[in-house]
Amino acid sequence: MPQPPPPSRRRSAHPHPAQATSAQHGDCDTDQPCLLERAQLHAVPSTLLIPLAARAHGGRYFAWLACHDAVATQLLAALGADIHAYLDDLPTVLNVLWRTRAIKQVGQAFFAEHPQALGVNLGCGLTHHFQWLDTGANQWLDADLPEVMALREQLLPLHCPRARHARVDLAQPGWWKRLGLPKKTDAQPVLLICEGVLMYLQPEQVHAVLAEFAQSAPPGSRMVLDVLTRQAVGRAATHASVGPTGAEFHWGVGRMAELEQVHPRLALLREQSVSECYGWTGIALDMLWRPWLGAPLYGMATLGVEHGSP
């Protein structure tokens, strides 16, 4: 497997995203606040710039992971976002591109089996997964906090009758019903994507989200999510991209098996570590650290609600 280049030594000033005033490809009118400033996103919602920058320009650093996002560059220009500091943080750029590939693989396999099923991106930010996962017959739902969806509706208006937007707060129970998602007695399974979201919730809130998925989803449904080791909890300030936003990591896992222990209907179908991107060196270090960390530094999990589950 190709080895990623070492992180750049260059580090530029990294303002809070809501204070960014110039785009990498085009300048904002200095007499008028940029769209991103007008949105006034709080700490956690403002992290949506991190994956957007990585998907737009990360391919220049990690060509073998380039995701060829058709809209990310235009979104950044429209936002008036200064993303240079995000691109300096090459480990995070790598993480985002790697998880994008993982999500695409899970999604493509799911919709190959269920071409008319529903896909849901929970905490979607400005990500546009439907560009890669549209079968021509499936349904799609992008959902996030109200302030994020207000911004998304300006920048990514719906053009497909099979797609819709919704506002949701995953910290509040009952989100499955509020989003109008299929009941577990329905035949069609559902694919849920939850990236860059759960680590910002409290542990009891994460358990509630996973339990609600398990209790409500039709058999055959899948949830793909990213996870941090529990050792990262409370240490977001040391993260080059997340730290300046003011967001904090509140949830991590001690063992990946904890995910399926939340509810008897859940099964951990696949676990992945970002160490695979670093070849044998990364895999060896992951094995060395695992007894202490209990889980990957950063990883992906695919959960399923299987046929015959209680």
Image (cartoon, grey):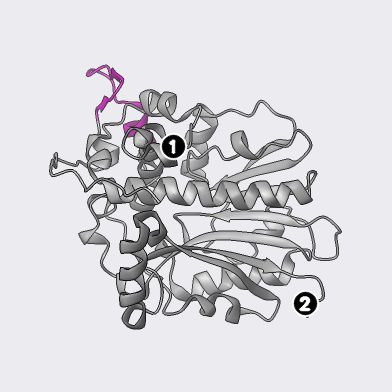
- What is the x, y in percent for residue 44? 37, 53
Q: Which stretch appears magenta?
A: 21-39
Dot 1 crowding, Cα within 10 Å, few <14, some 14–19, many 20+: many
Secondary structure beneath dot 2 equals loop
Mark 2 Cα shell of 10 Å, populated few (<14), some (14-19), many (≥20): few
Q: How many labels does the image show?
A: 2
Q: What residue type is labelled 2?
A: Ser
Give how far apart the Cα atoms at labels 2 and 1 are. 37 Å
| Residue 145 visible in the picture | no
Instruction: Answer whether residue 301 is magenta in the image.
Output: no
Picture residue at 46% right of the left edge, 57% below the top: 197
Q: In this view, does 183 lie above or below 149?
A: below
The C terminus: image quadrant: bottom right
At a point 64% along the width and 79% down the height, the residue shown is 263
In this rendered view, identify the residue nearer to me: 8 or 240: 8
Q: Which residue is drawn at 40% across and 51% down?
A: 1
Q: In which quarter of the view is residue 66 placed?
A: top left
In the picture of the structure, the residue carrying the numbered disc 1 is: 66
Local SS, label 1:
loop
- Tell me the residue at 53%/48% (across/down): 144
Q: Mark 2 points at which residue?
A: 309
Q: Is residue 103 above or below residue 164?
A: below
